[in-house]
Image (cartoon, helix red, strand yellow):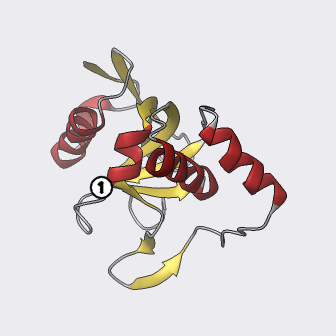
Amino acid sequence: MEIKYLCSKPDLVKDPVKKGIEEFCKTFSPIEDTIYILEDARTKALYCECHVNAKNIVTLATIDSPLDSENQAEYRANRDVVEDNIAFIHMKEDAKMKRSFSNIVAEYITSFDEEHPLKIIGGQHRFIAISEAYNTASINQTHGVKVYFGLNTEQR
């Protein structure tokens, strides 16, 4: 797999961030032959958009992710999951019928909770639907994720 840096200053991407990107690609095995590392022009945050299988998402990701693990470990960005919401019920049924989801937003970070290096920061309802489909019916579809790397507290 090739990694191409399309950010404004690719030569200035720090080695720990590059290592994290390489680890992500090795661990999650995106289906793309080339992973493009892009940059959010406003925040300068580095990210890629790719597709990975449900097994890797379910076993290596978590929705329990603090925005600031060092200073405010109890503060979370994810909204509460409303289990009886009709749209969420349909989403879980769709996942069991092999629907592929996208728009899952995550951060790859291993500095805390190394068992779950992918922290879901957007799309927790989709994550739960994918998890239930995988755990109850072994549905291992490919899903789209936007993964951020090397975020600081302000970028989060």
Q: Of helix, strand and loop, which one carries label 1? A: loop
Q: Nearer the viewer, residue 90 or 110?
A: 90
Q: Is residue 37 above or below residue 155?
A: above
| Left or right of 58, for residue 75 | right
Q: Nearer the viewer, residue 41 or 2?
A: 2
Q: What residue do we see at 25% from left, 18% from top?
A: 1
- Graded by Cα atoms within 10 Å as few (under 14), some (14 to 19) or many (20 or more), the crowding at tag 1 reads many
Q: Position of residue 12 (x, y in %)?
A: 25, 38
Q: Position of residue 150 (x, y in %)?
A: 32, 52
Q: Position of residue 105 (x, y in %)?
A: 53, 48
Question: Can the viewer see residue 101?
Answer: yes
Task: Report the label total.
Answer: 1
Question: Can the viewer see residue 150?
Answer: no
Locate residue 50: give its quadrant. Answer: top left
Q: Position of residue 114 (x, y in %)?
A: 22, 62
Q: What residue do we see at 23% from left, 65% from top?
A: 111
Residue where numbered disc 1 is placed: 117
Q: Nearer the viewer, residue 73 or 97?
A: 97
Q: Residue furthest right?
A: 86
Q: What residue do we see at 32% from left, 52% from top?
A: 60
| Left or right of 107, for residue 1 | left
Amino acid type, callout 1: Pro
